[in-house]
Image (cartoon, coloured by chain):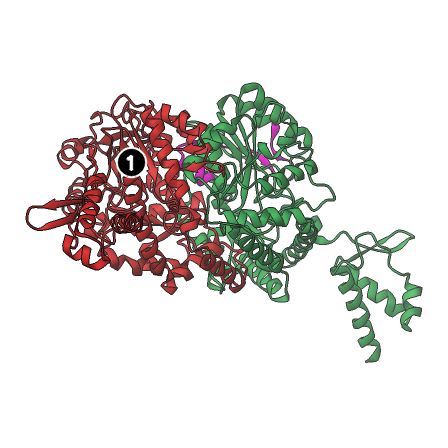
Chain colours: A red, B green
Amino acid sequence: MKKEFLYNEIAGNIAHQIRNGVLKTGDRLPSVRMLSAQHGIGINTAKRIFLELESQSLIEPRSKSGYFVSMPRYMRLPLPEASKPLAVARNTEPNELIDSVYSNMARKDLTLFSIGVPSGDLLPLAKLKKEIVLATRGLKDGGTEYEPLQGNEKLRRMIAARSLNWGGRLKDGDIITTNGCMNALVLCLMAVTKPGHTIAIESPCYPGILQLAVSFGLKVLELPTHPVTGIVMDAFKKLLPKIDACLLVPNFNTPLGYCMPDGHKKEVVTLLAQKGIPLIEDDTYGDLHFGAERPKCCKSFDKEGNVLWCGAVSKTLAPGYRVGWVAPGKYKDQILRMKLIQSLSSTTIIHEAVGNFLLTGRYDNHLRQLRKTLQENYNRYAQVIANHFPQGTKISQPQGGLALWMEFPENIDTAELYNDALKKQISIAPGRMFTLQDQFQNCMRLCIGLPWTDSLGLKLQQLGKLACNL
Amino acid sequence: MKKEFLYNEIAGNIAHQIRNGVLKTGDRLPSVRMLSAQHGIGINTAKRIFLELESQSLIEPRSKSGYFVSMPRYMRLPLPEASKPLAVARNTEPNELIDSVYSNMARKDLTLFSIGVPSGDLLPLAKLKKEIVLATRGLKDGGTEYEPLQGNEKLRRMIAARSLNWGGRLKDGDIITTNGCMNALVLCLMAVTKPGHTIAIESPCYPGILQLAVSFGLKVLELPTHPVTGIVMDAFKKLLPKIDACLLVPNFNTPLGYCMPDGHKKEVVTLLAQKGIPLIEDDTYGDLHFGAERPKCCKSFDKEGNVLWCGAVSKTLAPGYRVGWVAPGKYKDQILRMKLIQSLSSTTIIHEAVGNFLLTGRYDNHLRQLRKTLQENYNRYAQVIANHFPQGTKISQPQGGLALWMEFPENIDTAELYNDALKKQISIAPGRMFTLQDQFQNCMRLCIGLPWTDSLGLKLQQLGKLACNL
């Protein structure tokens, strides 16, 4: 009895350490003899433990070298291939689907795998509240006055200072603040496009960008996009003559989570500058890198001022604060005019509070923790997906950000899965939302910015079961 | 010597009481005999005092009844005539002028007669700060989450409740909140117009509306507008076949301050509904009535849901809060879609705080005080204008709101006055800003939402002197 107990406990502990990344892929385990000596168990029990772990695909024997931690099964889940949208602009908006998914966002009874922002549980609420109270009390006019047109000076200074992290050399005067990143994109599109223009974007693409482009009367050209490296450069070059403007999310793009290699970024910036085609760069996710380094932006390679670099704290700090910005390069006058016309001012108090928050260095502490959580979450999600979702499911390997993209076998329609899941209080974002074309019906996006709990894991398992039943 | 001193003192005291409204137009003054007895002065001295006051136009004799306080001279300043814009759309934006005027807005060294919002000194800062602190602490997520798409429920409920004041019957479900009123107008224009459409507006018109319309590729048709009753109905009816959409500010419009008579409002609503032409109504100033009654809106007469009624607290409570709304009638779905695309959410904390503020009834207390101040300010401004501005100056008689409109003799160019005034640390809004046509070069708008002080009065006198020198 005691032996059986020990056997279970030791096997469980090792499995736990592997699943939680204490032991990592390729780590060598102790030998049978060492394990036996360490825990006072017999050689056969130690052998049984390794066989048990091997049967769970957690470890693998390598000839004459002992046991090693396996590449986890979820790491061996295949990647989706690069997307293959039509090379012509198509504008069939999946409005009904989008309306339905967005209408769930405020429902507290749902597990919202469909959201595109981090859950409040992952945000530094107490510190943010404190900053707002301080800003409210500290501002002489209580924040009732409009800001200067270009935006809060402190906030602009801090954004400029942070540009060093990605090889930028921005000054506060280069930056204009906005009501969140969507507002920055609105101003950029109004400043550099005209109805009838063709805009090139990634595919799949954030639905808000698709809708925005359509609402401005633009033709939307979806570019073939690879889940690890982003837009396919050959296709991009071939389509270049058709393009009047370009809007990319090169770092940890939602839904794919890829990060464009520096070489691609540089080439895109050079090609577009040569043709005089403006590049709107949405870098909202750039600070959410899983790797050690903050990736560069297209803006890092912008010598001509042709890149309108947009960002926000909506995905890292507080979606509901509506704090975003744009460094519009040579389009600064147009953007200032558009801001004057469209909004005059952002919310004075909140922009002041975020400026102060960035000033203290608390932002970086928070980002470190958030990135760790998101990466761990991805691993946990992937593990459940490997074990509970249909055979043949492919998943993205995001290098940062909040999204995980899944591609099911072709017979599975995620619009159907969406309906089934909703009946079980689960909301997902079906793939068709992320295109204006007839694509991605067997795909979906899951938000990994939710706090991991046993019950979240069970919900994800339940979702997998629903998919298996389709 | 003593007699001369007494004479000056008594005349000065009476003049002071008249100028400060202690004695009001039509009040009867004591008889010569009574004045003599009251002050122990001779009959002839008393007579001289009355003659002196009469020569200042402060009092007037009425046959056999003695002396009465005169209609003050400024009340007899003539009104500008109704505007006469061309009956075709012209789009020459006075951008340079607008840029220059707006760039002064944040300068603390200027007397900003050019602003279009109340000064912070007239706002309930302490109470507002308290509400924000309470909202920040009270919201479970610290306001970091997005609001529901339609906006803060409490705020919508309070706006709906207040619609009773103008004969509205709105429910919270009829209202969508926005980032201030300009954002509401943006959403409305995007929802009901297409580039190339013709939009009818008042003339003179708020520059933000002109710029917005031009930026959306609309043709702008300026309507002849009377300074007391608003758009000239005959001209409006004649131009109706040319119009695709209409944007009016019927209550205390900036810069004219007029209030459209109910009959006109009703007729405009009926005519537009018959033709299926949407009416965007900007009612941001509606609560700033100088008279006892809150005026009705066009929306009050809207049976077809054809009026998109927009409002905000930007002109009454806090410009920098960006709290606005629209009750879009039958265009609700389009507006919700546009809000989803353009902004997703307003600033959660601030909208919650304003919702709470409206709930307490403090808003009405504040409005009462603000209205009183604005009306008193108008009288003070008008008095200075009557005494220190060029002969032949005409001024509006606003029935509410924040603006006073002046028309100088034709030889005075207010763009020139603007330059001269800026050298004296005074900023004004030249008339040419308020049109896309070749009009109003001899006009300007002054903000009456500044706290009245002796030094403000002197600045206004100085401005008058500059105008006299042109």
Q: Is residue B77 visible?
A: no
Going 14% across and 55% down the picture, which residue do you hit? A33
Measured from the top left, where is residue A399 in percent x and y?
A: 24, 46
Q: Is-magenta flag for residue B220? A: yes
Residue at position x 49%, y 25% in the image: B243
Which residue is labeled 1 in the image?
A385
Magenta range: B210-233
The amino acid beneath tag 1 is: Ile
Q: Is residue A309 above or below residue B283?
A: below
Residue located 20% across and 26% down the image: A87
Q: Residues within 10 Å of mark 1 (few under 14, many from 20)?
A: many
Q: Position of residue A39 (x, y in %)?
A: 23, 57
Q: What percent of the width, then of the height, locates residue B179?
A: 49, 44
Q: Is residue A31 left or right of residue A437?
A: left
**Callout 1: chain:** A
- Is residue A71 in view from this perspective? yes
